[in-house]
Amino acid sequence: MTQTVLLAGATGMLGNRIAYNLMEQPDARVRLLVRNAADAGKRAQLEPLLSRGAEIVEGDLSDRDLLDRATQGVDVIVSAVQGGPDVIIDGQVALAEAGKQSDVRRILPSDYALDLFNATPGEHMMFDLRRDADERIAALGLEQVNVLQGAFMDLFLPGRGAIDLDAGTVTFWGDGTQPIEATTVEDTARMTARVALDQNVGSGKFAFAGDRISFQGAAEIIEAHTGRTLERRSLGSEADLRAALVAAHKDMSNPYGAVMLAYLLYMLNGQTALSELQNDRYPDLKLEGFVQFATRNLPTYA
Ligand SMILES: NC(=O)c1ccc[n+]([C@@H]2O[C@H](COP(=O)([O-])OP(=O)(O)OC[C@H]3O[C@@H](n4cnc5c(N)ncnc54)[C@H](OP(=O)(O)O)[C@@H]3O)[C@@H](O)[C@H]2O)c1
């Protein structure tokens, strides 16, 4: 049965890949909610989707009339938006409310994280926003599927903060051995497109992961691939990280400093680890592990 999917965030890093993967599904009709669609860069990005039959509804999540129109005839809403409370809470809740009025059956909010529902309220701003939005959406009574895939795998590549090939270091809090779930952006998008249309998936968390990786484990794989040796540098214990987080919460000049430390805290203590992974739900969809991903993405340093 063909289902109509409304995707918000199709010009984003993840959302654009979800859009392509939705277009691959034979039973999906795809509608994209895009703001400033006339922008030349966006036009170029969206053209391949339009030429394959996607439809655009132009506007912002803050425009309730637009949301009422955009959700007409829609079966499933997929959100891959990013932003502050105005987008993640107000925008997504308004989208879900419009969906409810238009008899949309299901929504996949923009979660795509570790298990944010296990975070301690007040500790991680981005997880708080999503949990708050998801609770409000749940109260509306739509089916809600929370896609949880851990971190994006490129976090463990050199140049993304932890591993610095030029300096020859890997930097972490604690001893760097705590593994966390991680998945490539492409696999996250592939799974999301499948789950969105899978009527046998019930409301609640839908977790999967391409791999479980620690900073030490990633360093070993990168060392093996590059022939380099990376010096291990611990920034301190979990108590030290918590102290840095308290200080960062007080530093109004950089609100994202605290967000980064909160991600690292949950990567260190495993509090938001994923469980009940559904990696094998679609036998034809194999998730890429870190060795293969790193090998594809790393230059060879002889
Ligand atoms: N687990 C991880 O490691 C990880 C890492 C990165 C991201 N994520 C998650 O993945 C999701 C998507 O993130 P991303 O990095 O792909 O985001 P992104 O590249 O910043 O894209 C955000 C998208 O949301 C759209 N948008 C924002 N505000 C909007 C509004 N008011 N109305 C309509 N559209 C709006 C943007 O449209 P414009 O193009 O018009 O701005 C864009 O298409 C988020 O939930 C994020 O937390 C997870």
Image (cartoon, rainbow, N blue to C red):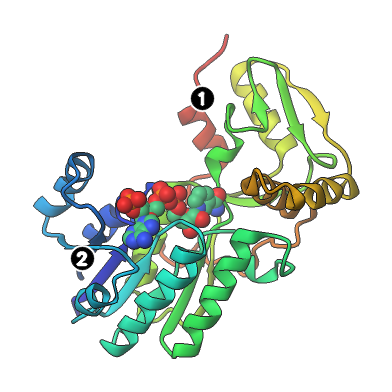
Residue 224 location in percent, x, y? 65, 23
Q: Residue at x 51, y 24 (%)?
A: 298
Is ligand 1 closer than 8 angstroms to the Cβ of mark 1? no
Residue 275 location in percent, x, y? 65, 67
Query: Is residue 17 shown to the viewer in this render?
Result: no
Q: Kindly identify which residue carries mark 1.
A: 298
Question: How far is the residue under mark 1 from the one under mark 2?
Answer: 34 Å
Disc 1 element: loop
Mark 2, other Cα within 10 Å: few <14 / some 14–19 / many ≥20: many
Is ligand 1 closer than 8 angstroms to the Cβ of mark 2? no
- Mark closer to the observer (1, 2): 2
In the image, what residue type sits under mark 2?
Val
Looking at the rendered image, the quarter that the N terminus falls into is bottom left
Residue 3 location in percent, x, y? 22, 76
Which residue is at the far front? 253
Residue 204 location in percent, x, y? 53, 79
In the image shown, does 249 or 69 lie closer to the viewer?
Answer: 249
Q: Kindly identify which residue carries mark 2.
A: 30
Mark 1, other Cα within 10 Å: few <14 / some 14–19 / many ≥20: few
In the image shown, does 277 or 156 lie closer to the viewer?
Answer: 156
In the image shown, does 240 or 26 lie closer to the viewer?
Answer: 240
Disc 2 element: strand
Q: Residue at x 49, y 63 (%)?
A: 280
Query: Is residue 78 left or right of 134 when viewed as pictured?
Result: left
Q: Residue at x 57, y 36 (%)?
A: 291
